[in-house]
Amino acid sequence: MGDNVGGGSPGDGTLIARAIQARGGPKAFVALWDAEASAKAFAAGVGARLTLKMGGKSQAVYAPPLEATVTVQSLHEGKFEETKVRHGGMRHFDMGPTAIVRTDAGLFVQLMTRRVFPTSLVQITSCGLDPTTFGILIAKGVQAPVAAYAPVCVKLIRVNTPGVTDADMRRLTFKNRRRPLFPFEAI
């Protein structure tokens, strides 16, 4: 929830991805907005192994970049079309040059150069991935992913991660606000 792209977050939060990587699995998918890491994967080419610092660059205060040695799985132009009615009504999407890399722990990272909110499974399938093969799909959204991901997810778990769209206002930093203001002070 704290990295909800549709709510205005950058889409480069790494908290859950870092936990999966540290644990060593299960096979999982996450999309991260990171033009720099995507460019490095493109320069290396499909099949290359390299160490990348992915995501965590715009809001490192919440979680630093995910650093891992990865294998470049595939490279894409990043355009896709959703033909079904989905959240927001958008049909055409452009993630910009997009790389799919895999860590040794089985974390598949979609490195986008443009932010796209997770309202379509075609975001995943357009890059040659089958969403049903993952134990965890990390969707950086609150409402947008519900209809899209329901056909392939047994359970949807909303996790209130820290970030600029954190659902717990008490964890956000305010410079100017009225006092008293619930939930900070009792009214």
Image (cartoon, rainbow, N blue to C red):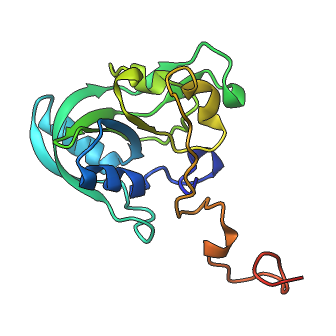
Say how many tags the image has. 0
| Left or right of 93, for residue 36 | left
Instruction: Identify whether 100 is placed above or below 104.
Output: above
Residue 107: % across, % down: 28, 40
Quadrant position of residue 90: top right
Q: Residue 31 at x, y = what percent?
A: 41, 40
Could you tell me if residue 95 is visible in this image? yes
Q: Residue furthest right?
A: 187
| Residue 126 in sight in this render | no
Residue 137 drawn above or below residue 77:
below
Residue sitting nearer the eye, 13 or 146: 146
Q: Which residue of the protein is positioned furthest toward the top in this rendering? A: 83
On screen, residue 153 versus residue 78, left or right, reads right
Q: Quadrant of the C terminus?
A: bottom right
Q: Position of residue 165 (x, y in %)?
A: 61, 59
Quarter of the rendering containing residue 39: top left
Camera-nearest residue between 68 and 184: 184
Residue 14 falls in image quadrant: bottom left
Task: Give the camera-side residue of 90 and 43.
Answer: 90
Q: Residue at x 15, y 28 (%)?
A: 46
Task: Name the residue at 41% across, 20% down.
Answer: 125
Residue 148, percent from left and from top = 58, 25
Please tell me which residue is depicted at 22% across the width and 37% down the height of the picture. Answer: 102
Front residue (pair 106, 72): 106
Q: Is residue 177 above or below residue 28?
A: below
The residue shown at (23%, 48%) is: 24
